[in-house]
Image (cartoon, rainbow, N blue to C red):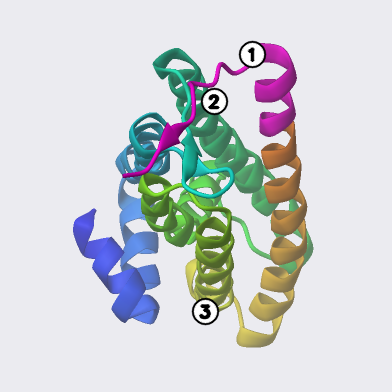
């Protein structure tokens, strides 16, 4: 699993071939990768919003109560899993138009590995900052897009032209799914769970 992370960052061409081979040999091989790495953003966010908090004005910082932070972290984890499953389903559904015949598990696995940059970007949750989060999401989105366009033709064993068209379709759906699940998560957390904020701290 750790080898795939390194290869996706250094030699994505080889990584996708290895990942597809393992998925052919062992369905659901992606599960440890998805379940463990999806924890990184949630754990880092919990630590960041309970220990450090984020800046409001001047030197004041506001934090979440442990209960509210736990609710947010669990909600983020579940949202990540649901979003990955949805993307896998859409990839499987769209495959019919591009003469690819992957299984649903293979499509979920592809979505999980493509989302790896987003998992790694979650480490920025240790220092809650709007601009840092935006920068991390932009960087993660750019590299995830690169992995998508490089990996889909190889993973689905399609010609380059057909694979790139398939990848472009997946990218469009992926943006829609990402925005939709994040907006739904935030609205549910704010309106359904009613977060509890701690008194602002003054940074020494």
* Residue 165, horizontal then vertical, whole percent: 74, 76
Do the residues under discs 1 and 3 have CB atoms within 8 angstroms? no
Q: Which residue is mark 1?
A: 193
Instruction: Mark yes or no: residue 27 visible.
Output: no
Regarding residue 173, the answer to whether it shows in the image is yes
**Helix, strand, or loop for circle 2?**
helix
* Number of marks: 3
- Give the residue at the far bottom of this rendering: 161
Mark 2 crowd level (few <14, some 14–19, many ≥20, 10 Å Cα): some
SS class of the residue under badge 3? Answer: helix
Q: Which residue is mark 2?
A: 75
Disc 2 to disc 3: CB gap under 8 Å: no
Q: Which residue is mark 3?
A: 150
For residue 57, above or below residue 163: above
Pick whichever of labels 1 and 3 is earlier in the sequence: 3
Residue at (66%, 53%) from the top-left corner? 91
**The magenta segment:** 185-204
Cα distance, mark 1 to mark 3? 40 Å
Q: Earlier in the sequence, mark 2 or mark 3?
A: 2
Question: Whole-percent x and y of residue 11?
Answer: 32, 81
Q: Residues within 10 Å of mark 1 (few under 14, many from 20)?
A: few
- Element under disc 1: helix
Q: Residue at x 44, y 37 (%)?
A: 53
Instruction: Left or right? Give the position of 201 relative to 186.
Output: left
Q: Earlier in the sequence, mark 1 or mark 2?
A: 2
Q: Is residue 40 left or right of residue 165?
A: left
| Residue at 69 percent of width and 56 percent of height | 174
Residue 195 counted in the magenta span: yes
Residue 44: percent from the left, percent from the top? Answer: 35, 41
């Amino acid at each position: 699993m750790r080898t795939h992370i390194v290869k996706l960052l250094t030699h994505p061409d080889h990584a996708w071939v290895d990942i597809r081979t393992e998925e052919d040999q062992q369905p659901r091989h992606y599960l440890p990768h998805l379940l463990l790495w999806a924890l990184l953003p949630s754990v880092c966010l919990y630590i960041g919003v309970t220990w450090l908090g984020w800046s409001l004005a001047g030197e004041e910082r506001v934090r979440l109560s442990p209960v509210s932070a736990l609710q947010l972290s669990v909600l983020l984890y579940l949202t990540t899993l649901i979003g990955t499953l949805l993307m896998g389903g859409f990839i499987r559904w769209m495959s019919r138009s591009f003469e690819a015949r992957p299984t649903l598990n293979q499509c979920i696995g592809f979505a999980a590995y493509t989302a790896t940059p987003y998992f790694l970007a979650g480490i920025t949750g240790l220092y809650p900052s709007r601009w840092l989060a935006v920068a991390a999401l932009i960087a993660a989105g750019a590299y995830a897009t690169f992995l998508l366009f490089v990996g889909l033709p190889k993973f689905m064993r399609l010609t380059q032209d057909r694979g790139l068209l398939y990848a472009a379709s997946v990218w469009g759906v992926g943006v829609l799914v990402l925005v939709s699940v994040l907006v739904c998560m935030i609205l549910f957390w704010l309106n359904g769970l009613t977060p509890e904020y701690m008194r602002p701290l003054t940074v020494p």
